[in-house]
Image (cartoon, rainbow, N blue to C red):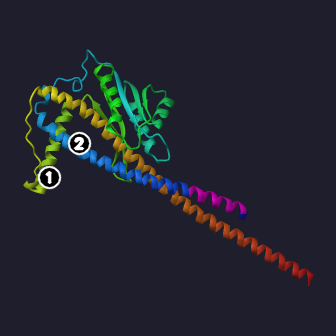
């Protein structure tokens, strides 16, 4: 058993560590609340955006825009652009490992070449270690993400796709389910699938109908829009804004997931530190008691020998 001085030193070290992890837990909890609030608010905005898109995109099959057009045999490149969203810092549990593992699985299962755009230092390091071509890195995004910060990323993705450099643009990110649950996911954002668009419009109409039934006719939010000018040009503009909004929403989801995962990881570390302190305190008391017992025995033996 270690001496009492060594155990006291370890107890002091663990207590200092617990202070750090507890502070990080509180900071992450504060950031998580703000990130979750932004994510939920953005989801509501996305819902209204799809309501407008539902009103204008009645004839999806007639759309002719580069962001909607899938590659044919003549212009197929056999390359995919993947946007990987991770964090700049660690100490956030399995957050980065999950999305990187999902990306590695995608790289192994695809028979085409995949280039990567990384958002966050952890993903950039992981991809370069694997020898994957990283064409751009964005590692300076703030914790409070603004839509203006997404413009360079979305412009790069749309320009590369419109220039026929890639057949698809995918995003690997982390869906925020709850404070305890986050799920790594890969989603295609380009080309904007006409089939998926129709299905999403139908699902939004179904959700809207269910809300009407549940809330009553007084809660009806349906609006009839009047449009002037070229409808196809309007929908094309909406397609670009929709692509930018999708990337923005995925970043918000990932940010909320990162802060939640870090808060839980730091809470677990603080709890583990508390248990370790209890175990070390018990070991310290046992060692001290053993020393006292030994000293008493030595004194008693000395007195017996004198008498």
Which image quadrant for residue 57? top left
Query: Which residues are drawn in magenta?
Result: 5-18
Mark whose residue sits in front, 1 or 2: 2
Q: Position of residue 125 (x, y in %)?
A: 50, 33
Element assignment for label 1? helix
Kindly report the secondary structure that dominates the magenta region of the rendered protein.
helix
Q: Position of residue 205 (x, y in %)?
A: 13, 44
Query: Against 49, is 162 above or below?
Result: above
Which image quadrant for residue 56? top left
The residue depicted at 23 percent of the width and 42 percent of the height is: 46
Q: Position of residue 246 (x, y in %)?
A: 28, 37
Residue, disc 1: 211
Q: Position of residue 86 (x, y in %)?
A: 42, 39
88 on left or right of 303: left
Which image quadrant for residue 240? top left
Residue, disc 2: 46
Q: Is residue 15 highlighted in magenta? A: yes
The residue depicted at 10 percent of the width and 33 percent of the height is: 58
Query: In 3D space, how far apart are the residues under numbered discs 1 and 2 (Cα atoms)?
Result: 17 Å
Disc on the earlier residue, 1 or 2 = 2
């Amino acid at each position: 058993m270690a001496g009492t001085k060594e155990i006291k030193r370890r107890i002091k070290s663990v207590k200092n560590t617990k202070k750090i992890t507890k502070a990080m837990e509180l900071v992450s909890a504060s950031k998580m609340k703000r990130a979750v609030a932004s994510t939920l608010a953005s989801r509501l905005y996305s819902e209204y955006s799809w309501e407008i898109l539902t009103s204008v995109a009645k004839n999806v099959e007639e759309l002719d825009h580069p962001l909607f057009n899938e590659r044919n045999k003549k212009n197929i490149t056999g390359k995919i652009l993947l946007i990987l969203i991770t964090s700049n810092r660690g100490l956030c549990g399995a957050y980065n490992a999950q999305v990187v593992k999902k990306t590695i699985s995608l790289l192994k299962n695809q028979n085409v070449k995949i280039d990567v755009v990384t958002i966050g230092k952890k993903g950039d390091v992981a991809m370069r270690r694997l020898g994957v071509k990283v064409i751009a890195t964005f590692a300076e995004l703030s914790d409070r993400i603004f839509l203006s910060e997404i413009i360079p990323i979305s412009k790069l993705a749309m320009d590369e796709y419109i220039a026929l450099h890639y057949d698809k643009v995918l995003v690997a990110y982390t869906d925020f389910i709850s404070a305890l649950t986050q799920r790594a996911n890969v989603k295609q954002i380009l080309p904007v699938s006409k089939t998926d668009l129709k299905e999403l419009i139908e699902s939004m109409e179904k959700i809207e109908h269910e809300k009407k039934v549940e809330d009553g006719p007084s809660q009806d939010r349906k609006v009839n829009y009047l449009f002037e000018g070229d409808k196809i040009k309007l929908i094309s503009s909406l397609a670009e804004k929709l692509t930018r909004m999708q990337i923005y929403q995925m970043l918000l989801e990932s940010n909320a997931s990162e802060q939640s995962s870090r808060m839980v990881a730091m809470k677990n570390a603080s709890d583990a530190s508390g248990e370790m302190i209890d175990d070390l305190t018990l070991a310290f008391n046992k060692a001290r008691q053993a020393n006292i017992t030994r000293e008493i025995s030595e004194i008693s033996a000395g007195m017996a020998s004198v008498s």
